[in-house]
Amino acid sequence: MTAWDIAIATIADEFSDLSGIEPAIRTVLRLLLAALLGGLLGNEREHHGKAAGIRTHMLVALGSTLFVLAPQLTGVSHDAMSRVVQGIVAGVGFLCAGTILKTSGDSKVRGLTTAAGLWLNTAVGVCVGLGHEATAVLGTLLALFILNVLPKIIEEPRQD
């Protein structure tokens, strides 16, 4: 066996985590759906001039999906997956905290809705990664309703 043959075999082995057409299609679909749903939520935020827009939301959804998919492909136990999800939720909290601002002398806190949206977006990504695509789509649609329609139905109290 030549060095070239060894190199090719090593590369093939390194990319063998998607060992068949079915797992490859499933993984591609889940990653694309996570990015799409994250983009829908991010588009809403970007449309309202918020800093965390399409790209940020897509990356959060895609990242949370990958964090779930990778251990799932290795066949981890339910207990281990529970710890993975706990870590994702705790980790995204730091990201969300960075979007919340309170200026001195101002009683208004800014960024709470964006932070909540990123947090929800993480849940959408986890759902997609676990194979609960319908739940993820429903959650995204409900979030879009809350962000776009609900403010037109109810009037939020003014803070003067």
Image (cartoon, rainbow, N blue to C red):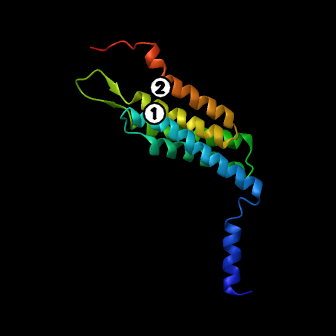
* Drawn side of residue 101 relative to residue 64, left or right: left
Residue holding disc 1: 44
Are the two marked residues, 1 and 2, in contact with CB atoms closer than 8 angstroms? yes
Distance from the alpha carbon under mark 1 to that under mark 2: 8 Å
Horizontal and vertical percent position of residue 78: 73, 40
In which quadrant of the rendered view does residue 135 lie? top right
Give whichever of 94, 157 is nearer the camera: 157
**What kind of residue is marked 2?**
Leu
**Dot 1: few (<14), some (14–19), or many (≥20) neighbours within 10 Å?**
some
Mark closest to the chain's N terminus, 1 or 2: 1
Is residue 141 shown left or right of residue 157? right
Q: In this view, does 33 lie to the left or right of 53?
A: right
Asked if one can make out residue 64 in the rendered structure from this viewpoint, the answer is: no
* Amino acid type, callout 1: Glu
Please say whether residue 62 is visible from this viewpoint: yes
Which is nearer the eye, 39 or 6?
Answer: 39
**Quadrant in which residue 50 is drawn:** top left
> In the current view of this chain or complex, which residue is farthest to the bottom?
2
Q: Measured along the vertical axis of the image, is residue 107 above or below residue 93? A: above
Vertical comparison of 38 with 107: above or below: below
In the image, residue 114 lies at what x, y percent? 43, 32
Q: What element carries label 1?
A: helix
Residue identified by numbered label 2: 147
Bin the neighbour count of mark 2 within 10 Å (Cα to Cα): few under 14, some 14-19, many 20 and up. some
Residue shown at 54% from the left, 32% from the top: 120
Using the image, determine if residue 67 lies above or below residue 106.
Answer: below
- Quadrant (top left/top right/bottom left/bottom right) for the N terminus: bottom right
Q: Residue at x 41, y 28 (%)?
A: 112
Q: Can you tell which mark lies on residue 11? A: none
Q: Which residue is drawn at 45% across and 42% down?
A: 54
Give the SS element for disc 2.
Answer: helix
Task: Give x and y (percent) for residue 29.
Answer: 66, 48
